[in-house]
């Protein structure tokens, strides 16, 4: 066999392998990276390119800012604490490096009776912020998560529980899948009792989904399509978070994953988030 014939055969074989792996030949994909919280550090890529050929291995290195420590990687096909870590690219993907502040905030004690409570979640009703400031939003398909009625509209006549803003998790009919995370670093003072409260609604469900609420990667609550009928209208959820009232920063995250058919959609709305 001539060198030219050998080279041609090798190219055809490589294309076949990529096709079998679900990646069309000559496919280039975008890897989106972010830091949670955004001031916690940066993510370096090697090689760093605007897009990557299918099958390319990329090394991700999380570099904490002063006063922060790297905790873990989050995103599509990755959930590890190894840093640096390698990832092969076979689709447009989004990855976040989660950092934790090293600062210990002294406890402020319990509110006095009749005083009410202080909310340690910033802009839990999504009235004053966009993704990338108070909240860190990550969507595999590029869907907006933080919404206002003027920009996202309504879904079946449904939108925020109160006010104009809310968080909208879901897949579009264009894609049968989605992985999305909304996160914020909060610090609860040292106290005996602590509660996480939020309103949740499932206005549409035609694809299977899992919606999770976590603190520091500990899953506190999950919702799937099986329970969706109970949340057609907004329902209040209260969760015990005593274990996180330590005076140390913790990552509060809301995550949505969906795998189904193109043309079908599911959506989960949350609003009025409080931690006290």
Image (spheres, rainbow, N blue to C red):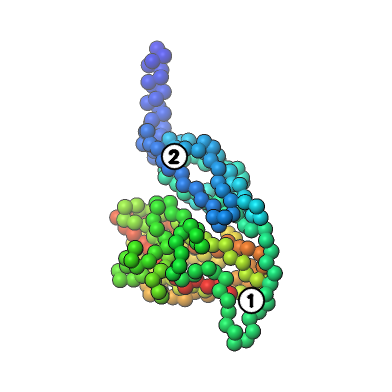
Q: Is residue 198 visible?
A: yes
Between the C-alphas of marks 2 and 1, the distance is 47 Å
Q: Which mark is residue 50?
A: 2
Q: Which mark is residue 132?
A: none
Give whichever of discs 2 and 1 has the lower sequence position.
Answer: 2
Residue 272 higher or lower than 254, as above or below:
below
Instruction: Specify the farthest residue to the top.
Output: 2
Q: What is the secondary structure assignment of the residue under circle 2?
A: loop
Q: Position of residue 224 (x, y in %)?
A: 44, 64
Q: Residue at x 38, y 15 (%)?
A: 4
Q: Residue at x 34, y 56 (%)?
A: 172
Q: Residue at x 46, y 40 (%)?
A: 89
Quadrant where the image shows the C terminus: bottom right
* Residue 171: quadrant of the picture: bottom left
Residue 130 horizontal side relative to residue 66, left or right: left
Q: Position of residue 187 (x, y in %)?
A: 62, 67
Front disc: 2 or 1: 2
Q: Position of residue 107 (x, y in %)?
A: 68, 72
Q: Which residue is labeled 1 in the image?
A: 193
Residue nearest the viewer, comparing 5 with 34: 34
Label 2 packing within 10 angstroms: few (<14), some (14-19), many (20+): few
């Amino acid at each position: 066999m001539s060198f030219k014939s050998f080279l041609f055969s090798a190219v055809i074989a490589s294309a076949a392998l990529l096709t079998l792996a679900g990646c069309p030949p000559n496919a280039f994909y975008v890897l989106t990276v972010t830091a949670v919280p955004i001031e916690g550090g940066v993510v370096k890529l090697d090689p760093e390119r605007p897009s990557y050929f299918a099958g390319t291995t990329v090394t991700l290195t999380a570099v904490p800012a002063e006063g922060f420590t790297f905790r873990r990687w989050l995103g599509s096909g990755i959930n590890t604490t190894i840093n640096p870590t390698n990832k092969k690219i076979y689709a447009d993907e989004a990855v976040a490096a989660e950092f934790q502040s090293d600062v210990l905030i002294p406890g402020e004690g319990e509110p006095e009776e009749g005083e009410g409570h202080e909310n340690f979640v910033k802009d839990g009703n999504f009235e004053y912020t966009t993704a990338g400031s108070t909240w860190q939003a990550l969507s595999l398909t590029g869907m907006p998560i933080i919404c206002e009625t003027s920009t996202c509209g309504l879904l079946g006549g449904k939108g925020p529980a109160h006010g104009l803003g809310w968080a909208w998790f879901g897949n579009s009919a264009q894609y049968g899948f989605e992985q999305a995370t909304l996160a914020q670093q909060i610090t609860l003072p040292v106290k005996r009792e602590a509660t996480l409260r939020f309103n949740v609604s499932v206005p549409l469900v035609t694809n299977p989904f899992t919606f999770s609420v976590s603190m520091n990667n500990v899953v506190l609550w999950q919702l799937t399509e099986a329970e969706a009928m109970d949340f057609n209208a907004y329902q209040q959820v209260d969760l015990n978070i005593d274990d996180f009232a330590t005076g140390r920063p913790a990552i509060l995250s809301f995550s949505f994953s969906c795998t189904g058919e193109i043309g079908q959609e599911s959506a989960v709305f949350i609003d009025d988030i409080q931690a006290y």
